[in-house]
Amino acid sequence: MCTVCGCGEGETRIGKAHAHDHDHPHDHEHTHGHDHSHDHPHDHSHDHAHDHSHTNDHHYGKGPAHAHAPGLSQTRMVEIEQNILGKNDEYANENRHFFTDNGILTLNLVSSPGSGKTTLLTRSLTDLKDELPLSVIEGDQETANDAERIRATGVTALQINTGKGCHLDAHMVGHALETLKPEKGGVLFIENVGNLVCPAAFDLGEAHKVAILSVTEGEDKPIKYPDMFHAADLMLLNKIDLLPYVQFDVDKCIEYARRVNPGIQVLQVSATTGEGMEDWYQWLRMTRQMRLIGRGDLAEKTESLSTASST
Amino acid sequence: MHEMSLCEGILQIIQTEAKAQQFNKVKRVVLDIGVLSGVEIPALEFSFEVVMRGSIAEQAELQINEIPAQAWCMQCADSVTVKQRYDACPECGSYQLQVSSGDEMKIKELEVD
């Protein structure tokens, strides 16, 4: 089991289905004393104790619920109303401002391990590096192997090792930006840790999440990991050159993806043969241009940032 | 997913609030967790106990309000309740649903001393 997130075994649906514990103690006491004597004083006592307690406790009946009546104890209730991931979202907003100010299109690439994310990325970098200013943040649990593969293409890359962590968070990316100094008007790829679960919830300040799924995986992955495919705006179906050799129903896969996310766009590519890659590049160019509308000062700029303004 | 990180986030918020609102013991933590938030409640309860150990919220009772998910069905032009993201509309069977709530993950309130 992952020590940070607890994702691992035991995360079954069963837990969820039964998380609604309905505790229903029903105490009904009924005493009926009837005294009858012959002297004709007629004593009729009718004792009717009706104790009806009804607790509707959602969680395993721990403790007396709502025992916080004023005056009974010194405890008080404090309204919090804060998102648990609020801290991450604050950092993500800082990153997003930085990206907007500098006209940088940031894409958060997410997939399971082995979907061909790094291969797809290195090919894209090789094909586009003379056309667009590019940079990469690599997230892996350990090793700098991927950053080295990226640097071999001539593009700047920074490796983040999450150690025990199963996802990148906005704070890590903020720090990476200070060192990486991505170029204005360029494209920044963030290759997240190979994991289809946790990265879905952590906003990094990116413009889009791009989910990569390969045909060697199951076609039902979009509904097995619905959170991720729901959060992504684009799905790249990779390794389509292998379709003749695997049992993978492309239409079914796309249908599943649309079930969890009716607005998702799907492109079929092969990073090995190059098939369909031009569509992906076109998507990149168009998306970048959309962000640069009204930013004529940045559109053609490729010089490095002298100082990073983000923290 | 990441329930341990979530609990660390909860502890961070509690510590910040403890300074701001002047309390030094937390007896109960009330969370709103949407059914689509991806949070596995038993895992959260487990991590909660571990993460709160040694903090001002040690032994605090964890109360979780599960928030049901609502979605807008484009075919029915109506709001419906769903259990999962890929659920079909319970009324018409369409998958053209826009989930509108159910991914909440927040600290609602604290009972403090």
Image: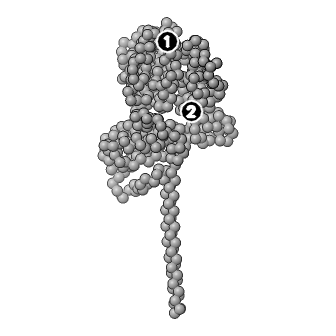
Residue at 51 percent across and 67 percent down: it is A28
Residue at 50 percent across and 47 percent down: it is A19
Q: Which chain letter matches label 1?
A: A
Give the residue furthest to the bottom. Answer: A39
Query: Cβ–Cβ below 8 Å for labels 2 and 1?
Result: no
Residue beneath disc 1: A125
In terms of secondary structure, where does tag 2 sit?
helix
x and y percentages locating residue B92 in the rendered image:
69, 39
In this rendered view, identify the residue nearer to me: B7 or A285.
B7
The quadrant holding residue A154 is top left
Q: Reading the chain from its start, which is encountered first: label 2 or label 1? A: 1
Q: Is residue A53 left or right of residue A181?
A: right
x and y percentages locating residue A55 in the rendered image:
49, 57
Dot in front, 2 or 1: 2
Whether residue A89 is visible here, answered yes or no, is yes
In this rendered view, identify the residue nearer to me: A294 or B30.
B30
Label 2 vs label 1: CA separation? 30 Å
Residue at 56 percent across and 23 percent down: it is A213
Dot 2 crowding, Cα within 10 Å, few <14, some 14–19, many 20+: some
Dot 1 crowding, Cα within 10 Å, few <14, some 14–19, many 20+: many
Whether residue A110 is visible here, answered yes or no, is no
In this rendered view, identify the residue nearer to me: A203 or A221.
A221
**Residue A224: image tag:** 2
User: Disc 1 residue type?
Assistant: Leu
Residue at 41 percent across and 14 percent down: it is A148
